[in-house]
Amino acid sequence: MPFTVFADGSANLPGSKLNGITLLPCEYTVDGKPETYLGNLDAFNGHEYYEQLRSGRVIKTTLLNTAMFLSHFTPLLEQGQDIIYISMSSGISGTYNAAINAAQELMESFPDRFVHIVDSHGCGFGCGMLAILAARLSQQGLDAKEAAARLDAEVPHACQYFTVDDLNFLKRTGRVSGFTATIGSILNIKPILYGDSTGHIVSCHKTRGRKKAIEALAEKYREKHIPESSPEVYISHGDCLGDAETLAGLIRAITPDASICIAQHEPFSGAHVGPGMLGLFFRGTER
């Protein structure tokens, strides 16, 4: 049976990557004023957004709730479609649990249909890579249950490493302590972070200075990537295109035929990592 692939604005997908993927909107507030991000990365003014963060504007995000999933999924189930949704990590957002609740309710109402929620254990392109794979599996004719099994098995291979320029944004969301943020800023420490096997953001390496942090990201790719023809690599940045292009050059030095997509980092999780965030996403042996 056919199935529909859902992701949301946190999947960081430009229009050229959306073939077969339906995006759900994400909501956040800027100094208390509600904003809705529909997932159209091509229309996202990343410079303006990250300038707001630099200037001290307070941006807070809201999880996607069960009611939203019910309203978007129900019409398709009524039409005989199955559904796969690629969720932001359960380790950093309640969105996954909200989607699970909706799926359980819907499968009781539609016992002949199949709704599967993939816990990406990541965000940004970490969700986007899996959504792209899901759409390809649908286009290849796999049914939803076969595709769901493939996607769940692929999650541990969705490598995603990133660094930040200002630890204070991670401090605000409880990812690092105030003491760590202060000392790190004084000593110019740039951590390399990743989503672990439980989907929580943890540090796996620390460097001194931005240049070494970018090089460390490239070394993670060298260590973990799976050699294959024209591998797909994704790089997102919080308004630091020059650094993203530097990282892309290092990746091409390792894998000359890599297909590299560079994009601004979406606003939903961007509020938590801040301007200067630089992320690298690829298929690897393990996280």
Image (cartoon, helix red, strand yellow):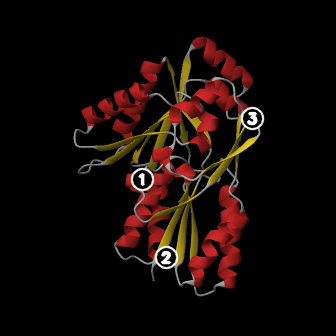
- Residue at the location (44% across, 67% down)? 150
Identify which amino acid the numbered label 3 is placed on: Asp
Q: Residues within 10 Å of mark 3 (few under 14, many from 20)?
A: few
Quadrant of res 181: top right
Q: Secondary structure at mark 3?
A: loop
Tell which of 117 and 18 is nearer to you.
18
Residue 183: % across, % down: 66, 16
- The answer to whether residue 248 shows anywhere in this view is yes
Q: Number of marks in the image?
A: 3
Q: Mark 2 or mark 3, which has the lower sequence index?
A: 3
- Residue at the location (35% across, 27% down)? 246
- Residue at the location (64% across, 36% down)? 272
Q: Which residue is mark 1?
A: 15
- Residue at the location (65% across, 67% down)? 69
Q: Which residue is mark 3?
A: 31
Q: Secondary structure at mark 2?
A: helix
**Does residue 127 appear to the left or right of 168 in the view shown?**
left
Q: Are marks 2 and 3 in contact (CB under 8 Å)?
A: no
Distance, label 3 to label 1, CA atoms, is 29 Å
Using the image, tell me which numbered label, if any, was put on residue 145. 2
Identify which amino acid the numbered label 2 is placed on: Lys
Q: Are marks 1 and 2 in contact (CB under 8 Å)?
A: no
Residue 58: % across, % down: 72, 32
Q: Mark 1 or mark 2, which has the lower sequence index?
A: 1
Q: Secondary structure at mark 1?
A: helix
Using the image, tell me which numbered label, if any, was put on residue 256. none
Q: Are marks 3 and 1 in contact (CB under 8 Å)?
A: no
Residue 50: % across, % down: 57, 31
Q: Residues within 10 Å of mark 2 (few under 14, many from 20)?
A: some
Q: Nearer the viewer, mark 2 or mark 3?
A: 3
